[in-house]
Image: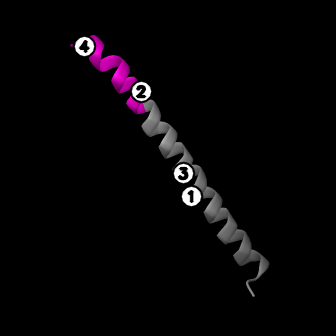
Amino acid sequence: MLSNQELTLVSGGAIKWTIGIVLGAIGAFLAGVLDGYLRPKCN
């Protein structure tokens, strides 16, 4: 069995990864929207 401290580290790491993936997805989506919005105006 894992100790409580190890479980906390594992769950904390999983939460950080989840937040990172979600933020990355949102950032990529926003970048794509901005790119699609700004690029036609520049041409």
Q: Earlier in the sequence, mark 3 or mark 2?
A: 3
Q: Earlier in the sequence, mark 2 or mark 1?
A: 1
> How many angstroms separate mark 4 from mark 3 (CA)?
32 Å
The residue beneath circle 1 is 17
Quick one: label 2, few (<14), some, or many (20+) residues within 10 Å?
few
Mark number for residue 42? Answer: 4
The residue beneath circle 3 is 20
Where does residue 28 sit, x and y in percent of width and height?
43, 39
Please tell me which residue lies in front, 40 or 16: 40
The residue beneath circle 2 is 33
Where does residue 17 sit, x and y in percent of width and height?
56, 58
Rendered residue at 52%/51% (across/down): 21
Kind of residue at disc 2: Val
> How many angstroms separate mark 2 from mark 1 (CA)?
24 Å
Q: Quadrant of residue 15?
A: bottom right
> How many angstroms separate mark 3 from mark 2 (CA)?
20 Å
> How many angstroms separate mark 4 from mark 2 (CA)?
15 Å
> How many angstroms separate mark 1 from mark 3 (CA)?
5 Å
Horizontal arrangement in the rendering, residue 19 relative to residue 27 (left or right): right
Secondary structure at numbered mark 3: helix
The reply to whether discs 4 and 2 touch (Cβ–Cβ < 8 Å) is no
Rendered residue at 78%/77% (across/down): 4
Secondary structure that dominates the magenta span: helix
Kind of residue at disc 4: Cys
Q: Earlier in the sequence, mark 4 or mark 2?
A: 2
Secondary structure at numbered mark 1: helix
The reply to whether discs 1 and 3 touch (Cβ–Cβ < 8 Å) is yes
Where does residue 36 sit, x and y in percent of width and height?
35, 23
Outermost residue on the left side: it is 43
Q: Quadrant of the N terminus?
A: bottom right
Quick one: label 1, few (<14), some, or many (20+) residues within 10 Å?
few
